[in-house]
Amino acid sequence: MFLSLLPSDHRSCGRRCCCLLNCLLLLMVLCSFWFGIRSDRWRHGVPPSCGLQGTTTNLSVDSSSPQDLYKDIALQRILYEKPDALKSPRSDISMMAPWFAPIVWNGTYNIDILNAQFQPRDVHIGLTVFAVKKYTVFVPTFLETAEKYFMVGHKVNYYVFTDRVSDIPIIELAEGRRMVVLSVPTYQRWQDVSMRRMEILQDYSRQRFMDEVDYLVCVDVDMRFSDEVGVEILSNLFGTLHPGMYRAPREGYTYERNPQSEAYIPLDEGDFYYAGGFFGGNVEEVHKLTNFCHNAMMTDKSKNIEAIWHDESYLNKYFLYHKPLKILSPEYLWDDDFGTPPFLKRRRFLAVRKNHNEIRN
C-alpha cells in the first residue's frame, strides 16, 4: 500500500530495499542456527574443527560435563621412580625374546602402573583347571591360595572341570569372583586325561568363554599359589618357561623327535621349552592354540602315534611357529625339587609334593 503511493522509480527502489532487508533477515536466522550448533559442540567437549570422521557415536544434548565424556580414558595419577632408558632393571637375566616378546621376571615391571591400565577396562579373567579322578584332592588348596594371590582386585571366573562334581568344595570367594564347576568325562589312562584337555578347552572357548571372560589362564590343579600373580602375565598369547628346561641347549629340549608326528620339531629348531601347566591369552588365541593341538593329536592318533610329552609336545610345536607375545619366567611355574637358584627372586606358583603314581592310578 505504501509503495503504491510513491512514484514508479521510487517504488522500484523500495522493492529492492525490501528484498535486501529480507535477505539480511534470512542470513541472520541461518547464522543464529549455525552458531547454536557450534556452541553445543563446544559445550560437549568436541572441537568443531576436528569433526568425528569414522565414528558412529551420537553426542546427545544433556547435562553431562566434559569430564564425564573423558572418564573412560582418564588414568589415575601415580607417583613412581623415573625409568632409565639406558639402564636395565636387572642384569642377571634375559628380559626379551628375539621377536620382542618380554620375559616377565620380578623387578622388570611396576604392578601399580599395570593395574591402573587394566582396571578401567573392567577386565574379566578365566582361570581353568582340570580336577579329574583323584586330582580333586588338590582343589581346596588351589582355590584358597588363588584367592590370596591370583589377580587380586580383578574379576575372576574359576572354571573347574571334573568328573566328580560332588567332590568339589564350596570356597568363599571375594567380590567379583565366582566358581563354575563343569562336568567332563573321564578316561582310563592319565595320558588321555591330559591330552583331552585341549579338546575341552577348544570347545568351551567357543561355546562359553567368549561370552564370559576376556583372557584365559590355563594351569595345572596340583599346584599352589605362593606369591602374587597379576595382570603382568596378560597378553594375546603367553607361555611359561619350563622349570627344568630353561638352561637346556636346543638339542637337549624334550621335543617330539618322531618326524611322522604332528608335534615333530627338528634338532636345529626351537626357541624355548614351554610348560604345559601354565599358558593362556585372550579367548580367541587360546581357541586357536587348543584347536591346533587337539587336531594334531587326533591326526597322530589315527597313525597310532603318541607324542612323548602328550599335550605339552603339541603346545611347544604351536609356540614355535606362533610365537607367544609374552613369556613368563620360571617364577610362574616352579618345583622346589629344582632348588632355589639365586636369580629366582620369587616362586609364584609351586608344584605340590605328591606321589605321582598313586595320584594317577
Image: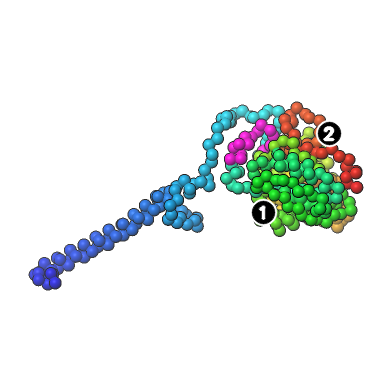
Circle 2: element type: helix
Q: 243 left or right of 82?
A: right
| Residue 67 spot, x, y in % from top left | 47, 46
Q: Around disc 2, counting alpha carbons within 10 Å, would you say few (fewer than 14), some (14 to 19), or many (20 or more)?
A: few
User: Which residue is found at the position 45% from the left and 56% from the top?
Assistant: 60
User: Which residue is found at the position 81% from the left and 30% from the top?
Assistant: 339
| Nearest the eye: 151 or 147 | 147
Q: 316 left or right of 75?
A: right
Q: Quadrant of residue 85?
A: top right
User: Which residue is found at the position 91% from the left and 47% from the top?
Assistant: 361
| Residue 158 spot, x, y in % from top left | 72, 48
Amino acid at circle 2: Asp
List the residue tagged with mark 1: 212
| Residue 334 spot, x, y in % from top left | 78, 36
Classify 294 as above or below 323: below
List the residue tagged with mark 2: 337
Q: Around disc 1, counting alpha carbons within 10 Å, would you say few (fewer than 14), some (14 to 19), or many (20 or more)?
A: few
Q: Is residue 240 visible in this depiction of the protein?
A: no
Colour convention of the picture: rainbow
Magenta part of the chain:
102-116
Whole-number angstrom distance, CA of label 2 to CA of label 1 = 37 Å
Label located before the other in sequence (2 or 1): 1
Q: Nearer the viewer, mark 2 or mark 1?
A: 1
Mark linked to residue 153:
none
